[in-house]
């Protein structure tokens, strides 16, 4: 192989694409460009075991640094792309140098939404949770007895709340919507997760937005909330979603719509350019979605690698997600977009539950809370296209294996 592949983004998708190509014995030259100053690493443990001090950073690395040289992957750290020139098949780097490519892959990920400076988002002590630098900064703040405000009651915010409570902080979560997890989960799941956090003394204030942060000498000291109250805090964590990093693609003339638009082969509107992971807007059941998950980043990147290597298999997403909070494991199979009915099923042991999502009578997703059997069963049903017998599902004494025939 002589075709040069340039991968922009050295996160989960970028690394998976390079590693898969080498696994397929495709030895074309690869340049992997990353903006951080460390080799590619796992992000999910950053906000959990790494922040808790239970896992050292070297254990988060996908591979030892010598792997890249041994596999002829030119890893360029602390480097970013200023411009893509599709007509010339070139990328312009921040230092003014130019890289030629035959094939280009965008694995640029997503960026956390931040608070506007007008309401205090530029104060010291206001953080997001995305990369190693964020985790290291938060580790300095996470000390017993300190008061943290978490803005946003989604999975990122609730996971941060769990870690902060584990470390002995006083935690307040505010959510401007009617309830936590409103965009991503059913009321039944939200109710269970809220109850778990309240048993750990997390204060959750729903239907409560942030008016502005209060600061002194440039550092956050409090928060004025939409209900008229003002609370004292030592720092804040913002968990209000992410936006796809699609600006480079847009400026290069690629089709963009809340992410870089790709087909079922992960190709963009330019056949020489692929995209995978959080930045990619992919086909889904006649529409288009972005799947913000490690699983999708890996699977879509590996599917793209197979196509780049000469394959022709389309990527058929089989979404699954997870969230660890305290000793609770929430596992999600499927994608609950557009659900119109749910069924709550108690698990076989105390504290175990599953929530089954239906759309027009068909199963589309399952939330399993400390219920591995429900998760595995739901995942198998979704992947095989079997719609479960409602009578069996509604009977808590019934063995879920019966649903699989």
Image (cartoon, rainbow, N blue to C red):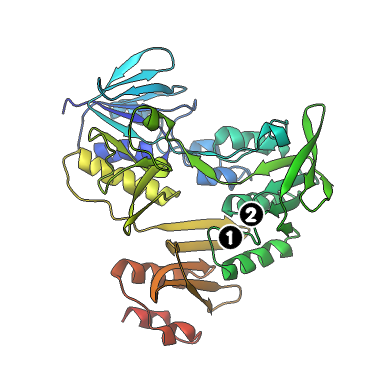
- Inspect this view and state whether residue 144 appears: no
Depth check: 62 or 219 in front?
A: 219
**Residue found at x 73% / y 65%:** 199
Quarter of the image for residue 212 reads: top right
Question: Which residue lies under the disc numbered 2?
Answer: 153
**Residue found at x 36% / y 13%:** 97
Quarter of the image for residue 316 reads: bottom left
Quarter of the image for residue 21 reads: top left
Residue neighbourhood size for the residue with mark 2, other residues' Cα within 10 Å, grouped as few (<14), some (14–19), many (≥20): many
**Residue found at x 62% / y 68%:** 192
Q: Tell whether 317 sits left or right of 170.
A: left
The x and y percentages for residue 210 are: 72, 46
**On-image quarter of the C terminus:** bottom left
Question: Which residue lies under the disc numbered 1?
Answer: 182
The x and y percentages for residue 304 are: 27, 42
Depth check: 78 or 317 in front?
A: 317
The x and y percentages for residue 286 are: 31, 58
């Amino acid at each position: 192989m002589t075709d040069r592949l340039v991968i922009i983004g050295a996160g989960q998708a970028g690394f998976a694409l390079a590693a898969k190509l080498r696994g397929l014995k495709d030895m074309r030259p690869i340049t992997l460009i990353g903006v951080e100053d460390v080799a590619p690493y796992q992000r999910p443990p950053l906000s959990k075991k790494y922040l808790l001090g239970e896992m050292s950073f070297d254990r988060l690395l996908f591979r030892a640094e010598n792997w890249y040289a041994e596999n002829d992957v030119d890893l360029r750290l602390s480097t970013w792309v200023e411009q893509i020139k599709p007509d010339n098949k070139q990328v312009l780097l921040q230092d003014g140098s130019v890289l030629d490519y035959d094939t280009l892959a965008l694995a640029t990920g997503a960026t956390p939404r931040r608070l506007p400076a007008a309401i205090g988002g530029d104060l010291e002590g206001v953080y997001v949770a995305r990369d190693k630098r964020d985790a290291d900064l938060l580790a300095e703040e996470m000390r017993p007895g300190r008061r943290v405000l978490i803005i946003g009651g989604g999975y990122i915010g609730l996971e941060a709340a769990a870690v902060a409570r584990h470390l002995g902080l006083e935690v307040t979560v505010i959510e401007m919507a009617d309830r936590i997890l409103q965009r991503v989960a059913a009321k039944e799941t939200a109710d269970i997760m809220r109850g778990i956090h309240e048993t750990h003394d997390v204060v959750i204030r729903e239907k409560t937005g942030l008016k502005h942060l209060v600061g002194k000498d440039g550092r956050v000291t409090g928060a004025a909330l939409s209900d008229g109250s003002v609370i004292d805090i030592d720092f804040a964590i913002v968990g209000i979603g992410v936006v796809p990093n699609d600006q480079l693609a847009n400026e290069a003339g690629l089709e963009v719509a809340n992410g870089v638009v790709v087909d079922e082969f992960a190709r963009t509107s330019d056949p020489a350019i692929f995209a995978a992971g959080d930045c990619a807007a992919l086909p889904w059941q006649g529409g288009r979605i972005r799947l913000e998950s490690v699983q999708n980043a890996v699977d879509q990147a590996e599917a793209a690698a197979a196509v780049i290597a000469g394959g022709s298999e389309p990527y058929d997403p089989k979404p699954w997600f997870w969230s660890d909070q305290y000793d609770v494991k929430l596992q999600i199979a499927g994608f609950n977009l557009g659900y119109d009915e749910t069924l709550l099923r108690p698990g076989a042991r105390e504290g175990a539950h599953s929530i089954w999502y239906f759309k027009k009578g068909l199963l589309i997703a399952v939330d399993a809370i400390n219920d591995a059997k429900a998760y595995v069963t739901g995942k198998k049903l979704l992947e095989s296209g079997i719609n479960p017998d409602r009578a069996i599902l509604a009977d808590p004494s019934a063995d879920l294996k019966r649903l699989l025939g």
